[in-house]
Amino acid sequence: MKKRKSPSGWLLTKLSIIGLIVLMSACDLFKFKSDQEDEEENPVVAEVEGNKLRLSELELLSTKGMNSADSSAIINRYVQSWIRKQLMIREASKAMAYDEAEINRKLLDYKYTLMVYEFEKAYLEDNLDENIPFSEIEEYYNSNQKNFSLKEIIVRCNFLKMDKSSNQNRNLDRLLSESEGKQSEAINDIALKYANNYFLEDATWIRFEDIIINTPLADHPNKVGLLKSNNLITVEDEKYKYFFRILEYKLQDQIPPMEFVSEEISKILVNKRRVSLVEQLQKNIYNSALENNEFKIYE
């Protein structure tokens, strides 16, 4: 004899099925709404075969303080760069077969390299002293003079650019003919009041090409001979008269004075300190790990 199903059991089963359907529909609706909300809050800016560039990524660009035109230009360049990169990746994947494991290994290696770089950079910012005393610069210069052979002419000089019609030109010619150090106050006074341009830093070595630029001497065919035969050089063009008092000069292949290369030496010594600090940091970390048995080498 068959046992009849209880009406209440059948109804409960029916309601359960309906409830499950409603729940599944609600989940789909929720998912749809979430995707829709995501599209509204973080819309796609560009797309290449399913790879999407979203607005949130553009918001990471630093455009604060820029006007709208500059900001738009930076964003447009980024979008175009992103598109080109995606297209290149697509073509590369079509044209060649890649070892996925090898690529992942390289990516991981690059990631670790960046991490170490940032760590070392932060360490150097906290520990690197960039103040190099004069004694260290002098010592390095004396020990490495042959490494500083000049590739250009350098001079110590006085330079004044005067109007061709200035009534001070004759007086200036006389003053500059005096020995170095004499009449400097009078020369400075003329420079401040009458010169169109001037350079009177007696102790400063500069490239000869820098001081004669935009003057008739720039095209002189024999600058070495000119320097060797004249302490006071005067030249003119249509509007101006140029005065050059050569106090001292050094030619190509000669050893420059320390003052001329002191900044370069300082950079060299700072870099040596930088390398030494990083090497010491690496050594300290290794020795600490060794003492604490933090790594093993299997044979």
Image (tube, grey):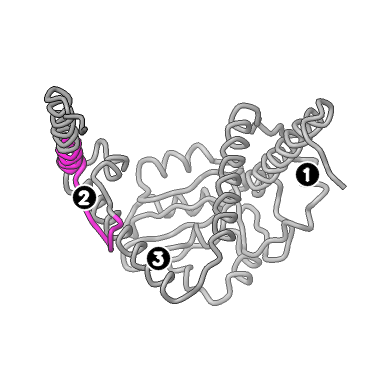
Q: Above or below — where is 16 with respect to 71?
A: above
Q: Find residue 89 and name its label.
A: 3
Q: Tell which of 150 and 64 is nearer to you.
A: 64
| Residue 222 magenta-highlighted | no
Q: Is residue 276 left or right of residue 54?
A: right
Q: Which residue of the protein is positioned furthest toward the right in this rendering?
A: 299
**Residue found at x 47% / y 73%:** 219
Please rate how many residues cluster around mark 3, counting C-alpha atoms within 10 Å: few if below 14, some from 14 to 19, many from 20.
Answer: few
**Residue found at x 30% / y 61%:** 83
Mark closer to the chain start, 3 or 2: 2
Please rate how many residues cluster around mark 2, counting C-alpha atoms within 10 Å: few if below 14, some from 14 to 19, many from 20.
Answer: some
The residues tagged by marks 1 and 2 sit, at their Cα atoms, a distance apart of: 59 Å
Q: Tell which of 185 and 91 is nearer to you.
A: 91
Q: Find residue 44 and name its label.
A: 2
What residue does disc 1 label? Answer: 140
Q: Above or below — where is 271 with respect to 165?
A: above
Q: Is the magenta stretch mostly helix, strand or loop?
A: helix
| Residue 120 falls in image quadrant | top right
Q: Tell which of 197 and 13 is nearer to you.
A: 13
- As helix, strand or loop, the secondary structure at mark 2 comes to strand
Q: What span is colored magenta in the figure? A: 27-51
Q: Percent x, y for residue 188?
A: 46, 40
- As helix, strand or loop, the secondary structure at mark 3 comes to helix
Q: Percent x, y for residue 295?
A: 78, 35
- As helix, strand or loop, the secondary structure at mark 1 comes to helix
Image marks 1 and 2: residues in contact by CB distance under 8 Å: no
